[in-house]
Image (spheres, helix red, strand yellow):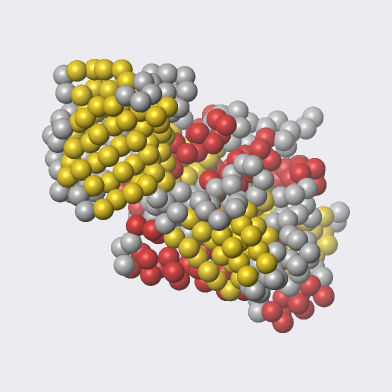
Amino acid sequence: MAGGSGTRLWPLSRAGYPKQFLVLNGNTSLFQQAADRLATLGAEDIAVKPPIVVGNEEHRFMVLDQLREQRLSPSAVVLEPVGRNTAPAITLAALQALEGGEDPVLVVTPADQTVTDGPAFTAALQDAVRQAKDGAIVILGITPDRPETGYGYIRAGAEGTGLRVEAFVEKPDAATAQKYLDQGGYYWNSGMFVLRASVWLKALQQFRPDIDQATRVAFGGKAVDGPFVRPAKEAFAAVPSESIDYAVMERCPGSPVALRMVPLDAGWNDLGAWEAVWQVAEKDAAGNASRGDAIIADSRNTLVHATSRLVSAVGLDNVVVVETPDAVLVADRSKSQDVKKIVSQLTAAQRDEQNLHRKVHRPWGWYDSIDMGERFQVKRIMVKPGASLSLQMHHHRAEHWIVVQGTAEVVNGDKTILLTENQSTYIPLGQVHRLSNPGKVPLEIIEVQSGSYLGEDDIVRYQDTYGRN
């Protein structure tokens, strides 16, 4: 499940490039780590099929690009036209999994978690898969190591050789969390579930038939485009928004549904806020953690995340500092869950910083708005090998292109030309044009826009490889 927006990890996580696609620890994104972990679950009695990814329509090419980097191919990428929480998401996945006529076991995991002990994770998931084969719904419960108030809890009791789920408990206050830790028998709810596709649909029909029916209608009207599966937009917008927990899991204890739990002690962390990022980061003797070009002095238990420049911190205690090219966050580490309040204010003010970075990723590559002023804007643009932008025109701006790396194929009106490093061209206002990379290395250009209006919505697309015209 890769559809979240990650508002509590702003300014690094934005709606247009959310946390699951970010590299927050290690050298791969959280989404890539999740896909890699699931690919290792195979055993003599467990066959692993390519993953089904459920995500946002706007992130579809990020999903494919990041899987390709890991040499993985999805069996399907189911695209939600609007967010409807996790219960409809897993329902779409279950319906997609049943398309081939089989009834496979689904290992359902969010794409924004981290695990440090891979073998322990694999062993726990394999145990869960074997139990789910017999018709049980199996939840992964995290063995707690601290009185955490940011997670929901599961109370579990012995049942034969395993554990049964007795109750779900909402996020506790600090005193209650400490009591759970001291008492034992309580586990953090990981949000990972293992169950047959048909078992999920049967439970959903029992507890929330409205979600089941509405999602089936949307899925029945789907369009398929290569790996992309698109449920009917208007029908999916009518699906009630609900989480897996509220829709089904919390209703199972005391019902005939077999709900079991497998403990997971594998260095798990849900990177939902900057506090969690600090928890999993390598720290110095004073508890400070940093990433990027950072210098920390006379500080304790502080996180500094630098993206584009040197960030220095002196005399801080329990503070988070996150720098990006267009925004800086400074927060008390214990208040990191409240970063979403800043995002709410940005949204209310209709500011772009809640949605996009200065560097914006596109299916063909990316662009970085490196400077702008009255009637001009300067962008650095990268086009992937073999990729091209749309055939387009602008009503209010002209553009100058200078190639700094690679080879550019440029359609400029009725002419098509090739440009190499240090060569340039001019696109007049109103001229139909297209930029392509015919080479085998990334193409980089500097674009200087000039005109009365420079917004991204001043674009008329005539042809587009990515279905945006």
* Picture coordinates of residue 430, whole percent (x, y): 13, 34
* Picture coordinates of residue 41, whole percent (x, y): 73, 37
Who is closer to the viewer here, 162 or 456? 456
Give left or right: position of 196 versus 141. left
Q: Is residue 165 visible?
A: no
Residue depicted at x 42% and y 18%: 439
Residue depicted at x 73% and y 66%: 287
Residue depicted at x 59% and y 63%: 312
Give left or right: position of 377 versus 7. left
Give left or right: position of 4 versus 290. left
- Above/below status of 416 relative to 425: above
Give left or right: position of 100 versus 341. right
Q: Quadrant of residue 315?
A: bottom right
* Picture coordinates of residue 117, whole percent (x, y): 78, 48
- Looking at the image, the residue that sits furthest to the right is 161
Q: Quadrant of residue 222?
A: top left
